[in-house]
Amino acid sequence: MSQHSGSNDNGAGRVLDTEAVRAGVRELRLGSPLLYFPSINSTNTYAASLARGGATEGTLLVSDDQTAGRGRIGRIWKSLPGQQLSFSLVLRPAFPPHFLVMASALAVAEAITAITSLETGIKWPNDVQVDGYKICGILIETSPGYAILGIGINVNGSLRDDPELAARAITLADAAGHDISREDLLIAILCRLDTLYSSLTSGGDPAWQGLRSDWRARLVTLGRRITLLQGEHTVTGHAEDVDANGALLLRLDGGVLQTVTWGDVQS
């Protein structure tokens, strides 16, 4: 896959080349059928309605503009029309859902490095970063019988006109110094995720713990003193490790080792 698939590929406002994506994922379990929306309120919301109606596992919804995209813990996802990747997958996992958290973050991190050569890290549990700046948000919503995996990536354009956001997030174009093919990146993510998903489905505990090990190796949170926000409550301590299920093991200032299953790492 190339970083560019034509002159000024995927500059501001370019429409995603869905036929190129369809061709790139034709042999995969995940990514078909592909449903494209020039603009939509939330791909996750619509994907959930399709899942409840019996949509095929692997159904992919992608949009050039999400008007009401959601992040983790109720946050709003800022849209850069025609410059980001915003997509959701309908999944029906036969393995514990916390492994989907690991697999999705790892697939995005590895695909970004493969396409851009940028080094990536994961802030627990699944925020993908470049140089300490957030590049990707992942939202997984589960219900009986299905899971919706939503991924939003800052690919092209810039966040520099929003100083508050630019203090913690960046686009791949700003990090790499040139525009990135959204099509190539989406295909790379789906290829890697498809492989991981198949392994999790059929490989049992060895595959699950192998994934955990690879995900853990990319966690930038471990070994640091952090503050964790849980709603109105904050917890501060040393991030020592993660357990077998991916929960964060936080050594509190009083010496107690606390197992944390959710929250937003602030520092």
Image (tube, rainbow, N blue to C red):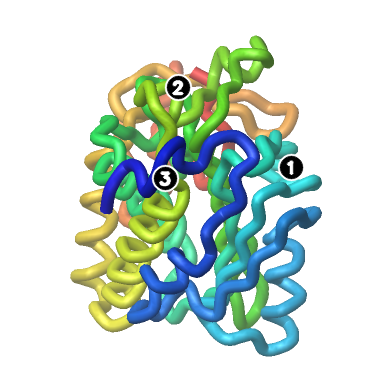
First in sequence, mark 1 or 2: give its number. Answer: 1
Q: What element carries label 3?
A: loop
- Taking depth in this image into account, of 162 and 193 the one nearest to the observer is 162
- Taking depth in this image into account, of 54 and 144 the one nearest to the observer is 54
Q: From the image, tell me which residue sits under label 3.
A: 181
Under mark 1, the amino acid is Gly
Find residue 172 and report its image quarter. top left
Q: Is mark 2 on a helix, strand or loop?
A: helix
First in sequence, mark 3 or 2: give its number. Answer: 2
Residue depicted at 33% across the width and 81% down the height: 27
Q: What is the number of the mark on residue 174?
A: 2
Find residue 35 and report its image quarter. bottom right
Under mark 3, the amino acid is Ser
Classify mark 1: residues with Cα within 10 Å, few (<14), some (14-19) or many (20+).
few
Real-space Cα distance between discs 1 and 2? Answer: 27 Å
Q: Where is residue 145 in the image (x, y as percent from the top left)?
A: 61, 82
Q: Position of residue 91 (x, y in %)?
A: 53, 75
Q: From the image, tell me which residue sits under label 1.
A: 74
Q: Position of residue 72 (x, y in %)?
A: 64, 43
